Amino acid sequence: MTAAARPGRSILGVGAVALILAVAVIASLALGANPLAPSAVIDALAGRGTSETAFVVWDLRVPRTVVGLVAGAALGAAGALMQAFTRNPLADPGLLGVGAGAAFAVALGVSLFGLSGAGEIVWPAFAGALLVTMAVYVIGASGTGGAVRLVLAGVALGAVLSGITTAITLTDPDAFDRMRGWNAGSLLGAGLEDLAAIAPFAAAGALLALVLAPGLNAMALGDDVARAQGVDVGRIRVGVIVAVTLLAGAATAIAGPISFVGLMIPHAVRWIVGPDQRAVLPMSLLAGPILVLGADVLGRVVIAPAEVPVGIVVAFVGAPLLIALARRRTARAL
Amino acid sequence: MSPRSRLVLASAAGMIALALAGCTAATAPEPAGASAASGTRSVEHARGATDVPEEPARVVTLEPLELDTAVAVGITPVGAAVAGNVTSIPAYLGAEDVAPVGTVPEPDLEAIAALKPDLILGTESRHSELFEQLTAIAPTVFIASQADPWRENASLIGEALGREDEVAELLTGVDDECARIRDEYDVAGQTVQLIRPRDETTLSLYGPVSFAGSLLQCVGFSIPDQEWEDGLQADLSPENIASARADHVFVTAADVADRSAIPAAVATAFPDATLVDTSTWVSGVGPKGAAAVLGDIERYLSANR
């Protein structure tokens, strides 16, 4: 356990991450495809601006910032849980079929029931994520085999559902057109009302994640070692699945399938705080929104007066960032 | 050479070829492989010259404009590529017994061959790599691009169908209808904006060269300047929705009765926006679609007089 980080550096790291997060939030409120002056943004926030600036700030930037905070935190924590649980640094929430289940439910809803607005898609997406991970658990938890069996079940079911989703969208391009916005990942889809309805699920998932952290630390050395330490491995496993489903399901429902955050954030966090899950999980909650909000802000300004959806920017920005980080340091063991 | 001038040149060449063919048709022996009863004409199009039947009877169209134009001149195609596999021929055409043959981006060659067409109409920019296979099924004529001005495309389709005069008449009819609406309602100097919501982050404004944009202008509206791509459309972030402000705002929708489908940004900025049918205003390119759009415009104007 050489990885136990020096406490001084950890505290410095937490401070730095919190500061960057604050900067990201301010940038998300201040910058956009509409080049408002900072003073105009402040006026609008204080309730003094013109109706146009009030609309841009209160109807667009504030909701998307809050959605970005919730979705980013949820994705970061879900990724950290999955990597700890599978003891695989390449794991992400998608391995349990969360995204595939949500996308499948959305495709069905759009093509069969003609759902179109982002608000109509939130609940089917969340329900799809829940149902599919439940199915994954039922298939994967029978017999022994632990996390590997669950992941195999998740990947298999996810692949089948993705295939069907692709078939639906290819045979019905109209549906695909309406799904496109959701598919690309967008912080503008869900309004504050939908967010308020979904956020409690994400919060419950985050709490559960923090409760699971000590048990996950024990499991890092193997299920047998954990059992010897008196940890109920089966209960932790159920807990992780429930938490990941709540976190990733909520994030996918309000922002669409944003990939890469769950994979990358825990890596970056472990480089800062070491492998202790009691530090990794809360830090992932803090760091996830930085990537999501940063990518969203970038997407708003690169092709102004139009925008690039956040899911696309995250992949563009995240991949080189991860490569750069990986080249600078050796990947931190779990 | 721009696509447009190429097209004009091609049409001109086609006209000459047609004239020559007309002179010699009486004496020339029937070319092998031509449809039994009547002779053929040569049509110059995006992929060169093709001999098409004098009176095509079994037409397959791969582009909405071609379907619309064919129906408008009274030649109901036996098959048409449609927007999606679960959707059918657009209702506004009022055409029945048109077999769907795959989607516009991915036509189904087997379904097309099974219909035994004597003429296939497609689009170079979409179906370029299918040309040889389509030609093996039946003589095939391609318009260059669906993004070119629709009147020129419609004229070429009229030529391929042997109904140039009818298409010319229909296009004149559109102009006359425009002029009539322009005279009756006098909207000169009033601005108009046509918004197509793509997804949460992208709103497309349609420009003066676009199908519906050209019709809005021909009845006398003016479309405020944007950073148009080829005059066709301009994409906007919802943050910049205010720059789409105009005296009259139209928003495309799949169901004009369902206002809940309007994205929140558009609904907030333009609570009085008028919903118009995507299947005619965006996809209904052609003389029949134009008549439907002009009908919508007149109904709107008379209701808001």
Image (spheres, coloured by chain):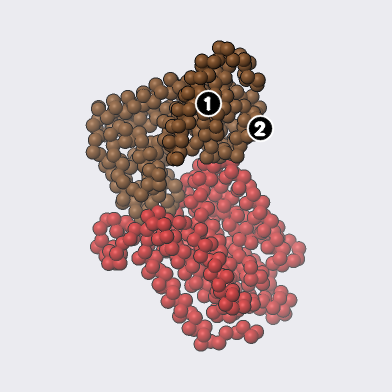
Quarter occupied by residue A80: bottom right
Q: Residue furthest top?
A: B26
Given the image, what chain letter belongs to the residue carrying mark 2? Answer: B
**Nearer to the camera, B126 or A106:** B126
Please count the marks in the image.
2
In which chain is the residue bearing label 1? B
SS label for mark 2:
helix
Left-right relation of B168 to A273? left
Q: Quadrant of the C terminus of chain A?
A: bottom right
Image quadrant in which you'd find residue B222: top left
Asked whether the beta carbons under mark 1 and mark 2 sit within 8 Å of each other, the answer is no
Query: Residue A135 lies in what quarter of the image?
Result: bottom right
Q: Residues within 10 Å of mark 1 (few under 14, many from 20)?
A: many
**Type of amino acid under label 1:** Val
Q: Going by the image, does A9 lie left or right of B239?
A: right
Q: Which mark is residue B43?
A: 1
Disc 2 marks which residue?
Answer: B110
Colour-to-chain, red: A
Seen in the picture, residue B55 relative to A203 is either above or below; the reply is above
Confirm whether circles 1 and 2 share one chain.
yes
On screen, residue A55 above or below B228: below
Task: In the rendered structure, find residue A23 and report the number of the disc placed on it.
Answer: none
Q: Residue furthest right?
A: A143
* Residue B57 in sight here: no
Q: Position of residue B256 (x, y in %)?
A: 40, 37
Q: Look at 55% across and 34% down and name the residue there.
A: B47
Q: Position of residue B36 (x, y in %)?
A: 63, 16
